[in-house]
Amino acid sequence: MSRVGVVGGGAWGTALAQVAASAGNEVLLWAREPEVVEGINTGGTNPIFLPGRQLHPAIRATDQLSNLDGAEHWLVVTPAQHMRSVLESAPAGDRTLILCSKGIEERSGRLLHDVARELHPQSHVAVLSGPTFAHEVADGLPTAVTLAADDEVSGERIRQLLGQPTFRIYHTDDLTGAEIGGAVKNVLAIACGVVDGRGLGQNARAALIARGFAEMTRFGLARGARRETLAGLSGLGDLVLTCSSTNSRNFSLGKGIGEGRSAAELMSDRRTVAEGAFTAPVLARIAEQEGIDMPIVAAVAALLEGSATAAQALEQLLSRPPRPEAH
């Protein structure tokens, strides 16, 4: 039995704790919320973020990050914009940090694995990403994910640690591609939600997914990602899932905007984070600076900052001149 630390007690962190415990590991989950710590330790449930599900008895919780110090592997599941501050407070150690959040650091424009390497140069860093709804993973429904690790030995160790018949792990060494897919799809999911909220139909959503994937690919290739990673589970696979269901926080945020509510109002009502709302502005800024054509991302950024209405953003996209599909 290995000891696994989970950094973050939201729905996804709790679901991954369930995966790790079901694979035969002792799991200690760190959470900020005292209700989460108490709920897990006294009743075996996360009453705030994953209610109604009995958790594996091998999962315990703590509000002291230093208590995870004995774990060789940490699943880091904090919101992307809080990852730096959490890792800054984490004790140094020779461990493996498996990053499970999706986003780009807003203030620096850096991918999360670069942030983790900066703060913990002595640690191994990997990325776990793919089409996953937390409640389905926690229920043990079949799921497949991408694990990006620098070397195959590290990847195999993590696969042995977490892999199960219902949680299939596919390895790559393309950390950049795995992260970019997860970050960009959140922004595109907001756009698909707007389409749904405006009642524009399934044809429009399918077209947006396809053209959004073209934007993801352009950005990824410009940043050194591999095309096959972007076309895999952490890119196209995650894009299709997140753009197709109100179980997606980003899709439901966009749906609310399409129905006429403001982004600020919708986000103030949420206890959970729609990462795409923070990724869109920085992604649009990087794309403009580097000359990468990403009109859907730019439209989402304009919607979120209030410089365009949903109707204006859609009109601007629909009035773009025709171009070859490969561009």
Image (tube, rainbow, N blue to C red):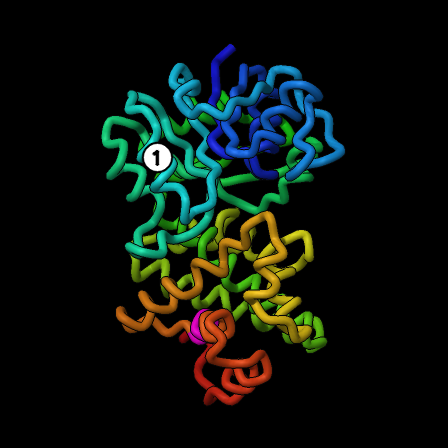
Is-magenta flag for residue 189?
no
The image quadrant of residue 120 is top left
Q: Position of residue 44 (x, y in %)?
A: 68, 22
Q: Looking at the picture, does residue 209 appear above or below residue 2?
A: below
Which region of the structure is painted magenta? 295-299
In-image side of 242 versus 211 (left or right): right
Residue 289 can be seen in this image: yes
Query: Secondary structure under badge 1?
Result: helix
Q: Residue furthest right?
A: 52
Q: How many numbered dots are placed on residues in this image?
A: 1
Instruction: Please state which amino acid type lies under the numbered disc 1.
Output: Leu
Quadrant containing the C terminus in the rendered view: bottom left
Q: Looking at the picture, does residue 123 appear above or below residue 245?
A: above
Identify which residue, 113 or 79, lies in the foreground.
79
In-image side of 256 versus 304 (left or right): right
Question: Where does label 1 land, which residue?
Answer: 87
Q: Position of residue 72 (x, y in %)?
A: 39, 18
In-image side of 60 versus 87 (left or right): right
Q: Residue at x 54, y 54 (%)?
A: 274
Q: Residue at x 56, y 23 (%)?
A: 20
Q: Residue at x 28, y 24 (%)?
A: 92
Q: Position of residue 221 (x, y in %)?
A: 33, 59
Q: Residues within 10 Å of mark 1 (few under 14, many from 20)?
A: some
Residue 326 can be seen in this image: no
Is the stretch drawn in magenta largely helix, strand or loop? helix
Q: Position of residue 237 (x, y in %)?
A: 56, 51
